[in-house]
Amino acid sequence: MADYKTDFRFAGELSPESRKYLKKQQFIRGVSFGLIFSGILIACLIAAALTISPFFWAFLFIPLVLFVMVSIAPLISTENHPTQIEIMDGVIYTTTEHGNTISKDIYDVKKVIDTGDCYFILFALLPKNFSCLCQKDLLVEGTLEDFERLFEGKIKRLNKNKEGKQNTL
């Protein structure tokens, strides 16, 4: 990633297509993290039941409930849509519809998915932010060329097939 000193700001209402893409990505990541977390919790409960007390078998339903809650949260939540994303001084600030702001360091960016109409920014490790979707036509400060230069080497472009549908990564 280049040390590029341009500030960027994407502001406005996401298009229905961008919202749909964002919800899909949030669901995929929610299920993935839910599976990992539930698997670890189940392994710990089984180990406790086998070594400490059979009483712990009664708690195996808890990871299932947590997994379901984590998985469906993006489907029922409306506050995960960004209304403004700013990149300033090496920090990405994502502000949602309800005024919540999440900040992540630019060096935590793992990958930027270019869908053609927007950039979906993924962060390394356990991200708190699955809402970092920058719709290209909402750019009000900076240029797309400078944005791509900032994330050079991290941008993965989605290919469109003959029907115009996106192939997923």
Image (spheres, rainbow, N blue to C red):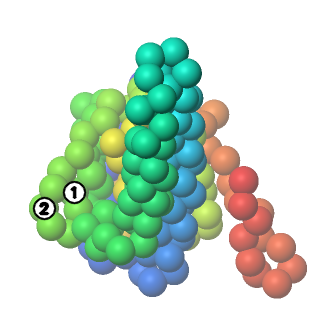
- Helix, strand or loop at label 2? It is loop
108 in relation to 112, above or below: above
Instruction: Give 129 or 118, whichever is nearer the viewer.
Output: 129
Q: Position of residue 129 (x, y in %)?
A: 35, 47
Q: Position of residue 36 (x, y in %)?
A: 55, 38
Residue at horizontal 33 percent and vertical 30 percent from the top: 105
User: In this figure, what is the number of numbered marks?
Assistant: 2
- Residue 166 appearing in the image: yes
| Figure quadrant of residue 3 | top left
Instruction: Give 151 or 62, whichever is nearer the viewer.
Output: 62
125 in relation to 66, above or below: above
Residue at horizontal 34 percent and vertical 42 percent from the top: 128
Q: Which residue is mark 2?
A: 99
Q: Residue furthest left?
A: 99
Q: Give the CA separation, mark 1 to mark 2.
A: 6 Å
| Figure quadrant of residue 89 | top left
Q: Which mark is residue 103?
A: none
Residue at horizontal 46 percent and vertical 60 percent from the top: 68
Instruction: Give 137 or 40, whichever is nearer the viewer.
Output: 40
Tag 2: amino acid = Gly
Q: Are marks 1 and 2 in contact (CB under 8 Å)?
A: yes
Q: Residue furthest right?
A: 162
Tag 1: amino acid = Thr
Q: Is residue 89 left or right of residue 45?
A: left
Q: Which residue is mark 1?
A: 95
- Residue 110 appearing in the image: no
Q: Position of residue 139 (x, y in %)?
A: 36, 63
